[in-house]
Amino acid sequence: MTNSIAIVYAVLATLGLKIFIDFLARAKARTLYPPGPRPKPLIGNMFDFPLTKHALCYIDWGKKYNSSILYAEALGNRVVIVNKRDDAIEMFEKRAKIYSDRPVIPMVKLMGWQYNFGFLAYGEEWRQHRKISQQNFNLKASRKYSLIQVKKVHQLLQALHDAPEDFDAHNKMLSISLAMEMMYGLEVKSIEDPCIAIADEAIKLGSDLLAPGGSLINIFPFLQHVPAWFPGATSRKQADIVRSLTEEMMRIPMDQVKTAFEEGRAVPSFFTDFFEKKQTFGASKEEEQAIQNIAYTVYGAASDTTISATGFFFYFMAVNPDVQRKAQAQIDHVTGSKRLPTLEDRMSLPYVEAIYREVMRLGPPLPLGVPHRLTEDDYYKGYLIPEGTAIFANIWAMTHDEDVYPDAFTFKPDRFFDENGVLNDDDRVLAYGFGRRICVGKHIASSTMWLMIASVLACFDITKTKDENGNDIDINGDILHLGLLKWAPYYYYCYSPDLCFHTQVKKPSLCVHSKRDLLQPRK
Ligand code: HEM
């Protein structure tokens, strides 16, 4: 008995010593890493990571530790946050060979999201997906989708005209139906369509599980082996739900488009282009799987981001009537107030271009981008960044950097013009990320956003809602709730704060008024 106690003590003492030595070793190595909050024994910086307003918190860290590159770690997960654009370009672009991987997030596989190629490791499989995507979505190739973009934007105008108070639903419809038609050639009639409802639920539940603090499995990966039936395994159960929703989300549109193709009634789309190619030249199993994965990825990657950006646009217009007036004058001048703007007008409407840039600057939909992973130890500015570190570009910090954008919190499209009134060369939209993982759909996103902005401003005035005394109701200023993967300010941006937070009554505090009837007859 005494012997067993002695053994237990000896084991505990050895364990304690090991933890202490590890801690000292880490503390020593820590001096080589970029600055950041001091880690605690065992848990590291686990409780230093913010749960909300991440981008703002990392700006504060930057000030506190006097560094634009920050380091923190918890339970073996290392994180670097990059607050400055030049550092992001140096790391993600000039050193792209080692900064282009993605961190492994255990939840991704449990939810069946490994088909989303945005999460794929940097390797052959990713390269194949990326190549096909680039061939289809580069600047020139993406023009094949412009008829669908125009149709969807015009449907948005009609919907805003018919039921302006439902602009939030119309916003959703624009992005979702655009992705569905581009990828599968399927026309979504309403956001209540079962296929959309399933996808919506999968994305909502899944994003919650991926959000910081959303699941312990992301912190303690061994928990993924706990069976879903085990008491308390809530996120494991949720992951199972998301996985079956995701399988449906992939299967339903694919079955529909395959049937349509076989029956000869398929509408041209990314998918049907592939089927045609397959019939003529054949295709490997891997290629077919990649096509399915890309279509599904685009649906997820294109919808919430565009919805968020469009939501920001409506908000910025409601609180900046002068900007609206100026843009409308330019649009009217070019179109003679007799037709809707077209994508061909883009060069002739520089102020609309500047609004697009400013919307994406002030409201980047993914404030911390999507993390990259470093595949080799690297030395940067004298700091060691160990292999395996997840690197976050704090896009929000970069687009709100007062040194680059004075008066950064004000919506000012004029900042994109030089002293001669010509658009300046600051046309790099940081909201699309960096390097080899930069948003592959950025040309489609850019043209959709631009056409939506020009067309909505041609037809509507956007104002704040008035109260019963005719005074403007202030719009909830807390739209800048900066999540990591919870990028959706539109959930509540348009509702007055009291109504939104206390009663959930959806009273829009933003109004859309028809300016004139430019809506063209459509089928
Ligand atoms: C306003 C709209 C959009 C924004 C702000 C946006 C933003 C982003 C960002 C920040 C990333 C990660 C970049 C990085 O890792 O550095 C990304 C990746 C991606 N985006 Fe977008 N996106 C938008 C629309 C779209 C659209 C319309 C598509 C498809 C047509 C798309 C497809 C993708 C894909 C497939 C990836 C993963 C790329 C990879 O990992 O190689 N996105 N996007």
Image (cartoon, rainbow, N blue to C red):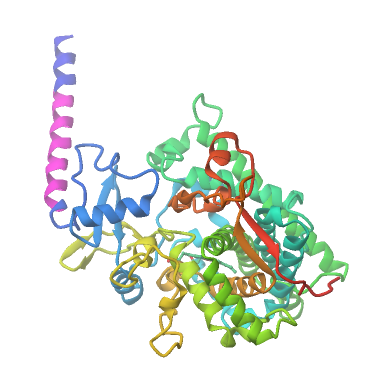
State the image quarter where residue 381 is shown: bottom left
* Residue beneath the point at 60% across and 79% down: 329
Where residue 149 sits in the image (x, y, percent)? 69, 73
Residue 22 in the image: above or below residue 487: above
Residue, far top: 1
Q: Give yes or no for residue 17 being in the magenta stretch.
A: yes
* Residue beneath the point at 66% across and 81% down: 332
Residue, far bottom: 420
Q: Give yes or no for residue 424 being in the magenta stretch.
A: no
Relative to residue 360, is residue 290 drawn left or right? right
How many numbered tags mark residues here?
0
Residue 197 in the image: above or below residue 230: below
**Can see residue 123?**
no
Where residue 255 sits in the image (x, y, percent)? 77, 58
Where residue 422 sits in the image (x, y, percent)? 45, 88
Dividing the image into 4 quarters, which one contains the N terminus?
top left
Where residue 150 sits in the image (x, y, percent)? 71, 75
State the image quarter where residue 372 is shown: bottom left
Which secondary structure dominates the residues rendered in magenta?
helix
Residue 194 in the image: above or below residue 46: below
* Residue beneath the point at 72% across and 79% down: 340
State the image quarter where residue 95 is shown: bottom left
Dividing the image into 4 quarters, which one contains the C terminus?
bottom right
Front position in the image: 431 or 41: 431
**Can see residue 426?**
yes
Relative to residue 400, is residue 362 drawn left or right? right
Residue 515 in the image: above or below residue 243: below
Relative to residue 492, is residue 393 drawn left or right? left
Front position in the image: 147 or 16: 147
Q: Which residues are magenta?
A: 10-29
